[in-house]
Image (cartoon, rainbow, N blue to C red):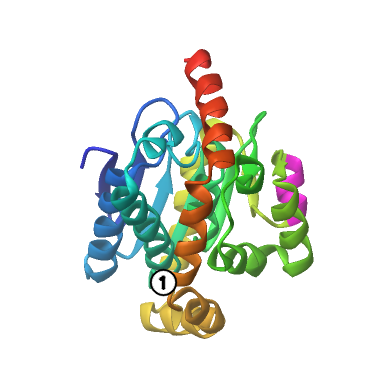
Amino acid sequence: MNTFKLTITDRLATIQLDRGRSNPINLDMVKELTSAVKDLDGDREVGGLIITGKEGFFSSGIDLIEAYNYDEVQSREFWTDFLQLQVVLASFKKPLVAAISGHSPAGGCIMAICCDYRLLADGKFIIGLNEVPVGIIVPDSVFNVYSFWLGQRKAYQYLMEGRLLNVGEALEAGLIDEVTAPDELMAAAERRARAYMQFSPKVWWQTKLNLRKELLAQLNTDQTETLDIMLKQWWAPSTRKGLEMMIQQLTAKK
């Protein structure tokens, strides 16, 4: 794996995102994560999974610098695969815990909200979905997962505002479940995952399936029409100009 590190200790797997300083999501990461999560879901020797990042960042979201330069075929492949990764994470049968180690906007937030439980390191970090200000149309599948935790009213308002929440706001809104000191994050995530792993795997999965039945049905609907609309806007001159400005800002920071 080129984009993350995988370890398994006493039946608990940990995926640590490891792509550059901020773990931006590109096509390689999406494909590697999808394959690994599927494998772990089917591995009888694995009872649960933690996904985490590195100090300061869980994931900064889509790698706009790389994604901007994808051609039309690559762009469709990327967005198709990213939405499929969302399905794979949300459908994971075993306990899935997000140990959010820092900033987690946009795509990083989407990965986190597919999990069963989210812990966020305390600090001056932000989390949320800011696709609208970036110029990316939010598919209904993303809204469905966001509103699963926040409720439709908050999810609608936050999405339309492109609102990013600080740690306290995220906890109050129910976007995260727990705040921990950065140096205690992984230990707390492991405790939560192992607490879930004590239950009967069959009971856990069937209950999770029951509670997510409508959500998973929504996520598994045909996304072709949604992707067509997203990609049309992605290639619109106004979106490209906005992305160019953002990329210039990101490059300047580097």
Q: Is residue 40 above or below residue 13?
A: below
Magenta stretch secondary structure, dominant: helix
The answer to whether residue 70 is seen in the rendering is yes
Q: Secondary structure at mark 1?
A: loop
Q: Is residue 100 above or below residue 216?
A: above
Magenta run includes residue 169 = yes
User: What residue is shown with label 1?
Assistant: 91
User: Which residue is pictured at 47% across the width and 46% down the height?
Assistant: 235
In the rendered structure, which segment of residues is drawn in magenta?
Answer: 168-173
Instruction: Please state which of residues 138 and 231 is positioned toward the viewer in this rendering.
Output: 231
Quadrant containing the N terminus is top left
Q: Is residue 14 above or below residue 44?
A: above
7 displayed left or right of 191: left
The answer to whether residue 9 is seen in the rendering is no
Instruction: Please state which of residues 74 and 107 is positioned toward the viewer in this rendering.
Output: 74
Residue 86 spot, x, y in % from top left? 43, 62
Residue type at the position of mark 1: Ser
